Amino acid sequence: MTKKAVCIIPARGGSKRIPKKNIKDFFGKPLIAYSIETALKSKLFDKVIVSTDDDTIAKVSQKYGAEIIKRPKELADDYTGTQDVIEHALSYLKEQGEFYEYCCTLYATAPLLQEKYLAEGFEKLKNSDAINAFSATSMPFPIQRTFKVTQDGRCQMFTPHHYMTRSQDLEEAYQDAGQFYWTKLHQKSTEIMFGKDSIPIILPRHLVQDIDTLEDWERAELMYEVLQKKRDLQEK
């Protein structure tokens, strides 16, 4: 029997820059709990699954309502891509006789994710001929004005002909927000995610923060705290 949608949250146990990142306490809850709870509250999914190699992550994830697919060690190293993890999970589900029309890959490090954007991605994908829909946000500055630092410690612009171009005359650029990725499972694309088969769901920049380093973590805490205070004031 084919079901509508499955959410798969990849969460390996071997994070190095922030040890035990996926279950590290973030304002009173393990970080991964925010992704699980948002997925469940959205009511978009027949099943919310965490794919992990780690028993502690599995136990925490089950506590917050997710089902578990235990992934093999060879899919839990520093070089395994997310797509391999998702394909393993989908293959496991097929072996159990479970088939889905849509899959949403949701990262475990997305405490700022809001249900409405998750739902927007699903609705826009369903009502289009696109194959993917993913979270994105605008760049905070014109990419045409960026530069690199050379080996001798000097500057070199990527597009020096735009050095004198006014910011308002430059085309706006966007980047992956790293929160969710919807995919139609009954269609295949030869394009990369950031290609013509994908719909970007634009999030405001104040809801987007990668969490790869301790500095990222601290910034995410500050952003979450401000958002929480704003919600508290709106409820009064």
Image (cartoon, rainbow, N blue to C red):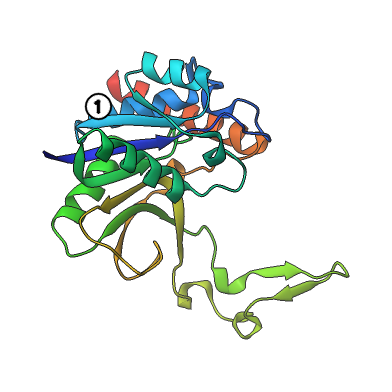
Q: Which residue is drawn at 36% across and 21% down?
A: 232
Q: Quadrant of the N terminus?
A: top left
Count of picture labels: 1
Residue 7: x percent and y percent?
30, 37
Residue furthest to the front: 95
Q: Which amino acid type corresponds to the residue marked 1 in the rendered image?
A: Lys
The crowd level at tag 1 (other Cα within 10 Å; few <14, some 14-19, many 20+) is few
Q: Residue at x 60, y 48 (%)?
A: 79
Frontmost residue, 149 versus 4: 4
Relative to residue 127, is residue 164 depicted above or below? below
Q: Quadrant of residue 111?
A: top left
Residue furthest to the bottom: 161
Residue 46: x percent and y percent?
19, 32
Q: Quadrant of the C terminus?
A: top left
Residue 56 seen in this snapshot = yes
Frontmost residue, 25 versus 221: 25
Frontmost residue, 168 versus 161: 161
Q: Residue at x 49, y 14 (%)?
A: 28
Residue 86: x percent and y percent?
39, 44
Frontmost residue, 64 versus 147: 64
Left or right: 3 in relation to 39:
left
Residue beneath label 1, please? 41
